[in-house]
Image (tube, grey):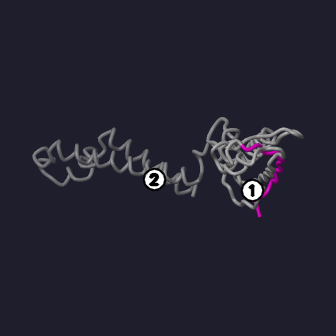
Amino acid sequence: MSGLIAFLATFAVLFLAAAVVDLPRRLWWRFRAPHFDNPEAHEPPDAAFRWRRIGLVVLAGAFVWQVVVLLRAAGAFDSGPDHAETLKRVRYAAANLATDEGQGRSKGLGNSWDEFIDLRLRGPGDDPSVRLVKKDGDVEKYEVAGICLTVTATPLPGQSEVTHAVGVNLLYSIKTDVQDSPCK
């Protein structure tokens, strides 16, 4: 792919340079004019050369666009964190989510912990996104760029039946586990 990018970039520069130095007019005078007794009378109008120059600029622009598309496909413009940085962010989110013995945390209005985790994954560059992969009772598995975060949320004892029934403001004891591999 790098060969194609170099090829397209080279021709984009050549076409742009040809338009700037008025190469269509120079080529006409070099190759067509010697065939005429009076070349000035047969020279194409300025508008014809102008359109040829515009065509060269448009062609150069198309090549530059293709170079950008290829570089984007190759990931040259990706500014997301590398795997080590993502793993560090996920461990930070897991440590912030986990609770001490006897302490509790509420889910709020959401039905999972993804919003809480997502806020702690933010950093410089593009942020990795969290995705709930599996929910089995109190255990939820989240995947973040190939990293598995397991959250075990157990309701704290002694909460009212109304709180349990509604599920809002229910406090959970949370344990987390981070595996540097996709969730199974």
Residue at 10 percent of width and 46 percent of height: 41
Q: Tell me the number on the disc at residue 66.
A: 2
Q: Who is closer to the viewer here, 53 or 124?
A: 124
Mark 2 neighbour density, 10 Å: few (under 14) some (14–19) many (20 or more): some
In this view, the residue farthest toward the bottom is 184
In this view, the residue farthest toward the top is 124
Residue at 67 percent of width and 45 percent of height: 168
Q: Please tell me whether mark 2 sits on a helix, a strand or a loop.
A: helix
Residue 62: say if magenta: no
Q: Main secondary structure of the magenta part?
A: strand
Residue at 76 percent of width and 43 percent of height: 171
Give coordinates of residue 94: x percent, y percent.
79, 44
Q: Please tell me whether mark 1 sits on a helix, a strand or a loop.
A: strand
Answer above or below: position of 57 versus 147. Answer: above
- Residue on which the image places disc 1: 141
Answer above or below: position of 99 versus 178. Answer: above
Q: Is residue 82 left or right of residue 53?
A: right
Q: Kindly identify the amino acid type of the residue bearing the numbered disc 1.
A: Lys
- Measure the C-alpha gap from mark 1 to mark 2: 40 Å
Q: Is residue 50 left or right of residue 166?
A: left
In this view, the residue farthest toward the right is 101
* Magenta range: 170-184
Q: Kindly identify the amino acid type of the residue bearing the numbered disc 2.
A: Gln
Residue 158's image quarter?
top right
Residue at 55 percent of width and 54 percent of height: 73
